[in-house]
Amino acid sequence: MKTLLITGGTSGIGEGLAKYYLEAGNRVIIVSRNKGDLPNAIYLQADLSLASENYRIIENIQRNYGAIDGLILCAVLQTARKDALITKEGLEFTFALQYLSRYILSNQLTFNDDSFILNVATPGIYSHINFEDLEYRRKFNSVKANANANRLNDLLGAGFKRKGIRYILYNPMAVRTTGSKSVFANPLMRLFLRVVHRLVGHEVDEIVKSMVDVLQESKSQSFSAYRISKPVDLSMKTFDLQKAKHLDEMTKKYF
């Protein structure tokens, strides 16, 4: 029996993966704001946009469940916003949840040998990284802030080095989930998203199967990235190791 930790596992892809691992007889710990209803899942409620909550969860897991065999990072806020949302710790929410939390959990949790981290983001897409404003507070735009956080995750994966742990970045592209269809408040944008998901979107079960296959395929690699089932070229400049080192040094200043 393996122990898997899934963030954002009460809906969409996270919930689909939780069901898969539970049915295979594994222990699944789900960390989210709300408690779900999957039989036999262990639910830990937390606001992962707060660094202190990440450390509390880490301490809880290590005290009660020990080392884990897999970390699946799905927690995300998809709703578009006009203004920056500042957490109680004084950080912009998108940056805190979609990058800083993933950095803390990846680096601070205790893993068994031959473990994996599966980071659900958008590898394979290039956009500018705003090193001058990692939180994307100035001239805030939630779509650009989200893209910036995803590029930070590209560098997190590229620069990640912990013995016995392989790091996989995974881009599911368009997935037919409730959250993805309600990103925008504007009725026309909502209609546009519905059309896109109807034409090119994938069902959650289809993406879960692809992710399970990717985890098997990537066993021999310490770092890999995929767009659905297709490997991403790791020579893309979004995986630049010097920038990854620079980001790591910048990130440590937040603690």
Image (cartoon, rainbow, N blue to C red):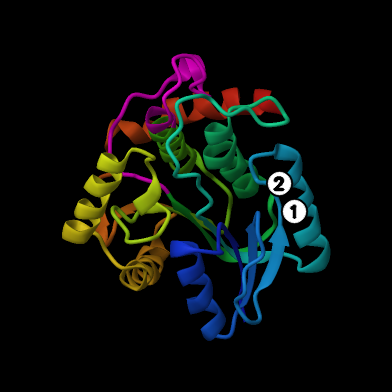
Label 2 neighbour load within 10 Å: few <14, some 14-19, many 20+: many
- Boundaries of the magenta span: 121-145
The residue singled out by tag 2 in the image is: 54
Which residue is more in the foreground, 13 or 250? Answer: 13
Asked if the residues shown at circle 1 and circle 2 are in contact, with their CB atoms under 8 angstroms apart, the answer is yes
Residue 243 falls in image quadrant: top left
Q: Is residue 224 visible?
A: no
Percent coordinates x, y for residue 124 in the rendering:
28, 43
Which residue is more in the foreground, 217 or 212? Answer: 212
Which residue in the rendered view is the most extreme toward the right?
Answer: 63
Which residue in the rendered view is the most extreme toward the front?
Answer: 187
Residue 177 falls in image quadrant: bottom left
Point out the image quarter for the C terminus.
top right
Percent coordinates x, y for residue 56 in the rendering:
79, 49
Is 129 magenta? The answer is yes
Q: Residue at coordinates 64% horizontally, 40% vertically from top-left?
A: 49
Distance from Cα at disc 1 to Cα at disc 2: 5 Å
Which residue is more in the foreground, 169 or 180? Answer: 180
Above-or-below relation of 176 to 146: below
Dot 1 amino acid type: Ile
The residue singled out by tag 1 in the image is: 57
Marker count (numbered): 2
Point out the image quarter for the N terminus.
bottom right
Determine whether, in the image, residue 164 is placed left or right of residue 140.
Answer: right
**Circle 2 sits in a helix, a strand or a loop, which is it?**
helix
